Image (tube, helix red, strand yellow):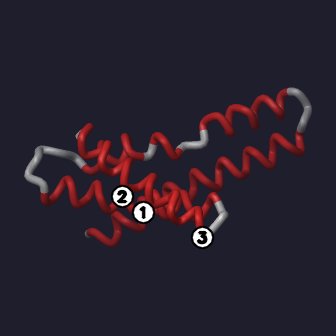
Amino acid sequence: DAFGAAIATLLGFSFSLYVEKFVRIPFVTAFAGAFVFGLIAQFWARYTGFPSTADLIIAGAVMPFVPGIALTNAVRDIMTNHINSGMSKMFESLLITLALGAGTSVALVLMT
């Protein structure tokens, strides 16, 4: 599963960087990357012959996309009474997380 996740991450992240050249919206680039690594995870689990699970490949491939530092900074800003900046960072992080889930879900639905 780790090798499949590495390949899915490499191709998904590369594709999201390619999409970012044309569309400067983080939500769209996260969706595109999640869609690609979701497809690759499904292809890897079904057609390579390795005893792999697509769920574990997706769990490994999504890690570079998760906005953990931004979410941590958002909570820190809210706790130090910087409500406006904290909430804007929080909603941006949650939208990126939503895009990751949506891209992965679309890929899984298309593959079934």
| Amino acid of disc 3 | Phe
Quarter where residue 72 is shown? top right
Say whether marks 2 and 1 touch (CB < 8 Å).
Answer: yes
State the image coordinates of residue 23 (x, y, percent, origin top left): 62, 68
Q: Nearer the viewer, residue 17 or 109?
A: 17
Instruction: Tell which circle, 3 or 1, labels the residue nearer the N-terminal end.
Output: 3
Say whether marks 3 and 2 touch (CB < 8 Å).
Answer: no
Q: Nearer the viewer, residue 90 or 33?
A: 33
- Distance between mark 3 and mark 2 Cα atoms: 22 Å
Which mark is on residue 22? 3
Q: Nearer the viewer, residue 103 or 14?
A: 14
Q: Which residue is mark 1?
A: 35
Label 1 environment density (alpha carbons within 10 Å; few <14, some 14–19, many ≥20): many
The residue under the point 13% across, 59% down is 47
**Does 81 appear above or below 26?**
above
| Amino acid of disc 2 | Gly
- Could you tell me which secondary element the residue under label 1 belongs to? helix
Residue at the left extreme of this rendering: 49
Say whether marks 3 and 1 touch (CB < 8 Å).
Answer: no
- Distance between mark 2 and mark 1 Cα atoms: 5 Å
- Dot in front, 3 or 1: 3
Is 20 left or right of 63, judged from the image as shown? right
Is 79 left or right of 18, judged from the image as shown? right
Which mark is on residue 38? 2
- Could you tell me which secondary element the residue under label 2 belongs to? helix
